[in-house]
Amino acid sequence: MKKYKLEIIVFLSGAIGMGLELIAARVLSPYVGSSNVVWTSIIGIILASMSIGYWIGGKWADKKADTDKISEILLFAALFTSIIPLLETLVVKQFAGLINNLIIAAILCAILVFSIPSFILAMISPFAVKIKSEEENEIGSLSGRISSLSTIGSIVGTFVMGFILIPNIGVSNINICITLMLVGMSIIIRKTRDKKYNYLILFLISIMLMIIIIGKYIFKINNPDILLDTDSQYSRIWVKQIETQQAKYKTLQVDTGLESYINAETGEMGAKYLGYYDLFEYYNKDAKSTLLIGGAAYTYPIHYLQKYQDKTIDVVEIDDKMTQIAKNEFGLNTDDERLNIYTQDGRSYLNYSKNKYDVILIDAFKGLNAPFELTTYEALINAKKLLNENGVVLTNIVSSLEGKNSDFIKYEYATYKSVFDDVKVFRVNEKDYTESQNIILVGIKGNPEVDIDKYEQYQKYIEMQISEFHSDKKVVTDDYAPIGN
């Protein structure tokens, strides 16, 4: 093991470097989101930083390369990693609020928080090559081996971080572990250690831990409304308690988006658009079974089970941590026999499920940051196959009805028209048609008779129907999907 000490350091540095990329996405997501723009910015900045690190590391290694130098590099990497929680509040939150352009905000935040640790970690490989070249003559093989070790480390780091560590211990704890791990690597690789060095290490560890604690404290002070800050395999999730003049609400936030909220005192669902989902019984009075794609905090299923004692609902939610949060924080009763939960991707469920439903509700879109695979002709054909005769699909879409931000609803309207026998459009609020808003799109299979007896109950919703809606857009397909992230 001692013989391969340097190779192990290269491997672990590669793993940590790639881990920083995943951490960056989680740190930035509550402030700038997790769209393609953000991921592109993170990947681009980290790769650029690593490229500069390789180049400058190589130049410095030519002047003097030994394991003590690598030890110093690792200490600097630990120091700059330890300040990430502090920079989240002092830099990311501030810049994201000040800069309106998402691309500029994402790039700038990625540079200020993650470019330096990525740059420092990249310097280790050229130092390792230089040190090993004094022992070996085959430079090409040596360089290839070091690069391969670093890359394999990156692969392992990606899988371990993404599949195991982030969903189980969270980014905040991972940051502490990485900081201590870098310090440990620095100690292991160093040749000359004396009392003075040991005291320096203890001092630096104390400083780094203090920085991390201060960062956590400042985050709490700046976000007193956050009740829960946790990571799942898919997202960073915040549960907040927000007070307005009207009421006190408990909210579920994923990235920058408000996914669900309830009245903290009554437990009633807060989002106005969810009330429109009850229109299913106006259009299909005999409906007994419902499928909801996108559970989030399960506010609608909770309402549904309370209101309809004779009906069942299946919920497809890809993130099982969402289900746990809904149970622990929002009052979901997972023991109700009328509720079935499938921890599965929504499109996969539509493709392969053998179940049949009277109603399908799609609530998985966050503005234009929609999973495109649920917007396409093929997805809706599969949804229609799962419907019983006279079944209905109701989908919540965030879009404007007219103007430059109306593409989403126009593409989806054209796609729904190509699949269903009848399509209806409702706006949830009396906003200007050019403003982004919740829009309910209804696709009907067959020719059901509306339940006139329910008209008075749902009159306020029915009157919000847009009787003449037109689209000049093409049908969205799996091959052609100009929306989504």
Image (cartoon, rainbow, N blue to C red):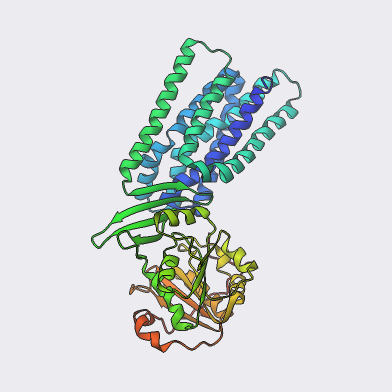
Name the residue nearer the viewer: 291 or 205.
291
Instruction: Tell me if residue 275 can be seen.
Output: yes
Instruction: Tell me if residue 405 can be seen.
Output: no
Name the residue nearer the viewer: 408 or 172.
172
The residue shown at (53%, 30%) is 120
Q: Left or right of 417: which side holds 112? A: left
Q: How many marks?
A: 0
Reply above or below: 307 against 325.
Answer: below
The residue shown at (43%, 67%) is 300
Give the x, y percent position of residue 126. 62, 27
Query: Residue furthest toward the left?
Result: 245
Give the x, y percent position of residue 425. 45, 78
The residue shown at (37%, 36%) is 215
Quadrant of the frame with the N terminus: top right
Give the x, y percent position of residue 242. 30, 55
Reply above or below: 288 against 399.
Answer: below
Give the x, y percent position of residue 99. 37, 50
Reply above or below: 203 against 211.
Answer: above
The residue shown at (49%, 30%) is 179
Reply above or below: 225 against 56.
Answer: below
Q: Left or right of 17: which side holds 204? A: left
In terms of image quadrants, where is residue 254? bottom left
Name the residue nearer the viewer: 201 or 312.
312
